[in-house]
C-alpha cells in the first residue's frame, strides 16, 4: 500500500509518490518569532511532526521548518518593548523550540532563518524581474499577478473574480490590487539590506520560496501549513517559485491543517481566550497536549476545552496503565513494530482517530493477556506505537506519580461522582460502572457509604 495524502491543489486524497525514489523533501511554514506560540500554532507543528515520523519509516526525509525573523510585527514588538529585534527573535525562537520539544516535536532537519537568506531572496527577485514577472515601483518590487496564468489555482479563485471583488485601496505603486510585495524600502531605523532597488527588506512570501529552493531544491515533495496560509501566502509562494523556475512544479503535495477554536470561539486577543503553549506545559504533561492536538483528524476543525485535555489524559492513563509493571528491555522495544493496522491508519492521510482506536485495541489485548512472554511482546508493541506517535515517552510509574498535582481536579472528580449517583438513580448501571472505572484509572478510589460517596486518591 502506498501512503495516501490529501492534496489541497488537487482537492482530494491521492497516492503519495516522492520525486526521488526513497527520498522525501518537506517544508513547513514556521512561526514569526515575536511572541509566544499559542495552542493553535502548535497544531501544524505537532501534526506535521507526526507526518515526518510516519514518512521516516519508509523514506529518508529532509524536513525544513523556517523561522520568520524579519517582519513588520517583529519591528512593532521591538518598538513597543524597546528590546533590539535580534534579542526578540532569538528569545522567541528558542522558546518556540523548547515549547514544541515539550510536546514531543522532534527538531526538523533544517531550521532556516529568513535573515540568513536575504542574498537568495534578492537573487530570486532579480530573476523574476528579468523574466518579466515582477516590476519595480517607488523602491518596491512587486509580483505582477496578471503575468502568471495559474494564479489562484490552489485557493480556487480566479483572478478576474478577485479583481471584481477587490475593495482594497490600491496603493499607487501597484499596477494591480493583487500584486504583492517582494521587496520594500526600509527607513534608517528599520532592518534593511542593500539591494539593486536600494536599502530595503523582503516581503513575507518570498522568504519561504527562497529558503525552500536553497535547502530542498526547485521542486519539493510536500509543502505544509495551516489552512489560513492557503491564500495568499501559499498561492504567492507557488507564483514566485514556478515563475522563477520556468514553470517547474513547486510542491507536489500541499497539506493544510484545520483551525483550532477555544470553547467554540475563535481564539483571539480581543476575546482574551488565547492559550499559550508556554503556560499550558507548566501544568499539563506535554503528551496530554500532544494527544489532544492529534485527537481530531488534522484537516478537521478542533475545538479545545478543558474536556479535550481531560479526555486526552484519561486516554494516556489507559495506555500507561496497560504497560505499567511489565518489564520490557530496550532491545525488545527497539525490535518491536507497531501493529500494521495502526501504521495503515496513519499512512491513510494521517488518520489519527483510527490509529488511536488501534492503540486502545492493543492495550485491551495486553490487559487480557496472562502469559508473561505475550505480555512483554504486546507491551513492546505498545512502546513501538508510542515511539511512532510521540507518546508513552515517560516511565509508567513516573507518569502516575506525576498525577498528584496535575491529575483530575477535585472539581472534576466531584462532578463525575454526581453523574454516577444520578446514573445509579436512573438504574443506568453501565454508565455508573464506567465512571467508577474511569476514576479508578485516574488513581481515584471511591467508596459508597450511608452518607453518600467519598473519594480519595490512591498512592
Ligand atoms: P503564524 O506565526 O501566525 O504565521 O502561525 C504559525 C502557524 O500556525 C501557521 O501554520 C498557521 O496557519 C498556524 N495557525 C495559526 N493559528 C491557528 C489556529 N487557531 N489553529 C490552527 N493553526 C493555526
Ligand atoms: Zn511559508
Image (tube, rainbow, N blue to C red):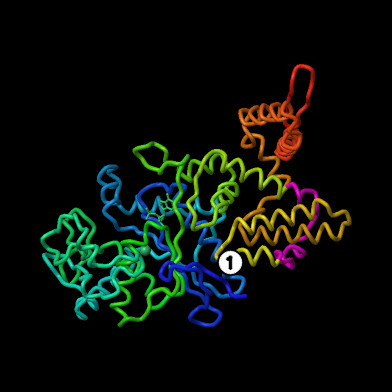
Residue 459 makes an appearance in the image: no
Answer with left or right where residue 239 lies relative to residue 65.
left
Residue 372 magenta-highlighted: no
| Ligand 1 within 8 Å of the CB at mark 1 | no
Q: Quadrant of the C terminus?
A: top right
Is 80 placed above or below 236 here? Answer: above
Residue 197 image position (x, y, % from top left): 16, 69
| Front residue of 46 and 349 | 349
Residue 403 image position (x, y, % from top left): 66, 38
Residue 327 magenta-highlighted: yes
Quarter of the image for residue 406 reads: top right
Q: Quadrant of the N terminus?
A: bottom right
- Which residue is painted at 36% across and 55% down in the image? 32
Residue 300 makes an appearance in the image: yes
| Front residue of 191 and 149 | 149
Quarter of the image for residue 420 reads: top right
- Which residue is painted at 22% across and 61% down in the image? 192
Q: Please tell me how many numbered marks the rendered image carries.
A: 1
Is 331 placed above or below 243 here? Answer: above
The residue range painted magenta reads 321-339
Quarter of the image for residue 307 reads: top right
Answer with left or right where residue 245 lies relative to residue 415.
left
Q: Secondary structure at mark 1?
A: loop
Quadrant of ligand 2 in image? bottom left
Question: What residue does disc 1 label?
Answer: 348
Residue 130 image position (x, y, % from top left): 20, 80
Residue 431 image position (x, y, % from top left): 72, 36
Amino acid at each position: 500500500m502506498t501512503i495516501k495524502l490529501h492534496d489541497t491543489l488537487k482537492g482530494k486524497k491521492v497516492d503519495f509518490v516522492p520525486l526521488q525514489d526513497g527520498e522525501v523533501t518537506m517544508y513547513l511554514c514556521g512561526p514569526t518569532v515575536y511572541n509566544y506560540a499559542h495552542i493553535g500554532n502548535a497544531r501544524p507543528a505537532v501534526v506535521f511532526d507526526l507526518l515526518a515520523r510516519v514518512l521516516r519509516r519508509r523514506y529518508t526525509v529532509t524536513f525544513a521548518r523556517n523561522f520568520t525573523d524579519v517582519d513588520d510585527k517583529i519591528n512593532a514588538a521591538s518598538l513597543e518593548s524597546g528590546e533590539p529585534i535580534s534579542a526578540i527573535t532569538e528569545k522567541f525562537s528558542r522558546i518556540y523550540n523548547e515549547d514544541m520539544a515539550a510536546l514531543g516535536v522532534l527538531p526538523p532537519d533544517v531550521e532556516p532563518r529568513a535573515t540568513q537568506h536575504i542574498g537568495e531572496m534578492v537573487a530570486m527577485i532579480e530573476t523574476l524581474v528579468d523574466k518579466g514577472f515582477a516590476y519595480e515601483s517607488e523602491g518596491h518590487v512587486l509580483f505582477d499577478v496578471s503575468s502568471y496564468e495559474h494564479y489562484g489555482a490552489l485557493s480556487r479563485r480566479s483572478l478576474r473574480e478577485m479583481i471584481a471583488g477587490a475593495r482594497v485601496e490600491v496603493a499607487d505603486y501597484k499596477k494591480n490590487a493583487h500584486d504583492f510585495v517582494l521587496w520594500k524600502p526600509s527607513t534608517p531605523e528599520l532592518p534593511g539590506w542593500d539591494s539593486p532597488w536600494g536599502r530595503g527588506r523582503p516581503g513575507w512570501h518570498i522568504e519561504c520560496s527562497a529558503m525552500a529552493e536553497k535547502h530542498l531544491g526547485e521542486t519539493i515533495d510536500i509543502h505544509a501549513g495551516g489552512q489560513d496560509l492557503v491564500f495568499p501566502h501559499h498561492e504567492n509562494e507557488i507564483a514566485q517559485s514556478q515563475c522563477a523556475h520556468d514553470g517547474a512544479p513547486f510542491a507536489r503535495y500541499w497539506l493544510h491543517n484545520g483551525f483550532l477554536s477555544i470553547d467554540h470561539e475563535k481564539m483571539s486577543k480581543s476575546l482574551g481566550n488565547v492559550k499559550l503553549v508556554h503556560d499550558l506545559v507548566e501544568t499539563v504533561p506535554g503528551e496530554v497536549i500532544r494527544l489532544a492536538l492529534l485527537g481530531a483528524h488534522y484537516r478537521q476543525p478542533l475545538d479545545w476545552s478543558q474536556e479535550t485535555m481531560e479526555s486526552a489524559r484519561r486516554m494516556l492513563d489507559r495506555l500507561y496503565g496497560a504497560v505499567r509493571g511489565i518489564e520490557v528491555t530496550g532491545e525488545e522495544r527497539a525490535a518491536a513494530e507497531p501493529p500494521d493496522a495502526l501504521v495503515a491508519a496513519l499512512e491513510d492521510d494521517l488518520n489519527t482517530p483510527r490509529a488511536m482506536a488501534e492503540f486502545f485495541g492493543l492495550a485491551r489485548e495486553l490487559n487480557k493477556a496472562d502469559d508473561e512472554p505475550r505480555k512483554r511482546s504486546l507491551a513492546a508493541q505498545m512502546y513501538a506505537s508510542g515511539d511512532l506517535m510521540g507518546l508513552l515517552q515517560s516511565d509508567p510509574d513516573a507518569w502516575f506519580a506525576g498525577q498528584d498535582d496535575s491529575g483530575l481536579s477535585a472539581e472534576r472528580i466531584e462532578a463525575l461522582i454526581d453523574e454516577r449517583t444520578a446514573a445509579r438513580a436512573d438504574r443506568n448501571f453501565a454508565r455508573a460502572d464506567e465512571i467508577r472505572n474511569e476514576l479508578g484509572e485516574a488513581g481515584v478510589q471511591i467508596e459508597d457509604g450511608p452518607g453518600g460517596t467519598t473519594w480519595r486518591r490512591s498512592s
